[in-house]
């Protein structure tokens, strides 16, 4: 059966097309666009993506309003059933605000918007999303955010570290994130939130392909399961 992915568009999303292009390039099948106001997801989904952008203009807190969009109830239910969910940048913010991932994304240290390619270290190369990388591998992925400073209390950080749920770490933090965390997994390993944009690093013409393995890992693992 064909791989079926969906991506959610919120008011203010601006990386949804990038995500759709990446998913189709890797899977060979165009993903389904879902509007944030929809109550239900398409049937039999293999993958759900929450893209980057500035949902609701980042008013209140980044991702806070989008976390209460009607579609998020269905996304939560799907995640609890084990459907893989990837949240990138604003999508990561939405996942934390929705309670699918712990912690919060705060204003960057220095109060500046950061837009550049940064080095990351793969901290867990055994997840659905990261199996195509090597443990400790350094990769380069673009970031573009104003509120990417990951915060959690020490007990939560210790739990994330101890359970191998830190997926990616900045080689040197660009935004003040505690313990240089760039991406984390949920307990079941089927939800990944990350601030860097792997969908912007799948073609040489875009400056690099280090994000490609993330999509190949997820799509390949699901198709061959």
Image (cartoon, rainbow, N blue to C red):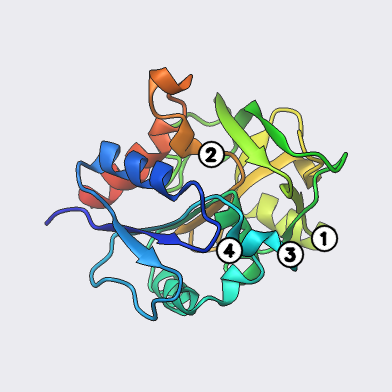
Q: Earlier in the sequence, mark 3 or mark 4?
A: 3
**Label 2: element kind:** loop
Distance from label 4 to label 1 (Cα)? 17 Å
Residue at figure coordinates x 63%, y 72% from the top left: 65
Could you classify mark 1 by the number of other residues whose Cα lies within 10 Å: few (under 14), some (14-19), or many (20 or more)? Answer: few
Could you classify mark 2 by the number of other residues whose Cα lies within 10 Å: few (under 14), some (14-19), or many (20 or more)? Answer: many
Q: Are marks 1 and 3 in contact (CB under 8 Å)?
A: no
Query: Which residue does the numbered mark 1 point to in the structure image?
Result: 153
Residue 105: which numbered mark, if any?
Answer: none
- Above or below residue 23? Residue 87 is below
Distance from label 1 to label 3 (Cα)? 19 Å
Residue at figure coordinates x 82%, y 60% from the top left: 153
Query: Which residue does the numbered mark 4 point to in the structure image?
Result: 95
Distance from label 2 to label 4 (Cα)? 15 Å
Q: Earlier in the sequence, mark 1 or mark 3?
A: 3
Image depth: mark 2 or mark 3 in front: 3
Image depth: mark 1 or mark 3 in front: 3
Query: Which residue does the numbered mark 2 point to in the structure image?
Result: 197
Query: Which residue does the numbered mark 3 point to in the structure image?
Result: 61
Q: Position of residue 189 (x, y in %)?
A: 48, 57
Residue at figure coordinates x 33%, y 73% from the top left: 41
Q: Which one is nearer the viewer's eye here, 151 or 30?
A: 30
Residue at figure coordinates x 27%, y 71% from the top left: 42
Note whether residue 132 is visible: no
Distance from label 1 to label 2 (Cα)? 25 Å
């Amino acid at each position: 059966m064909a791989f079926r992915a969906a991506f959610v568009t919120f008011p203010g999303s601006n990386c949804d097309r990038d995500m759709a292009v990446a998913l189709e390039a890797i899977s060979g099948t165009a993903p389904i666009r879902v509007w944030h106001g929809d109550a239900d997801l398409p049937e039999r989904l293999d993958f759900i993506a929450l893209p980057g952008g500035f949902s609701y203009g980042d008013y209140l807190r980044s991702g806070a309003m989008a976390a209460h969009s009607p579609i998020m109830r269905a996304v939560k239910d799907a995640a609890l059933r084990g459907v893989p969910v990837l949240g990138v940048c604003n999508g990561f913010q939405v996942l934390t605000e929705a309670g699918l991932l712990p912690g919060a994304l705060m204003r960057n240290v220095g109060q500046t918007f950061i837009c550049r390619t940064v080095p990351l270290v793969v901290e867990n190369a055994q997840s659905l999303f990261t199996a195509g990388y090597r443990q400790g591998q350094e990769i380069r992925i673009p970031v573009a955010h104003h509120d990417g400073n990951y915060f959690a209390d020490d007990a939560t950080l210790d739990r994330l570290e101890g359970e191998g749920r830190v997926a990616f770490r900045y080689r040197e933090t660009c935004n003040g994130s505690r313990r240089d965390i760039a991406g984390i997994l949920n307990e079941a390993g089927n939800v990944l939130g990350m601030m860097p944009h792997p969908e912007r690093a799948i073609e040489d013409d875009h400056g690099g392909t280090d994000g490609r393995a993330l999509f190949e890992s997820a799509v390949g693992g699901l198709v061959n399961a």
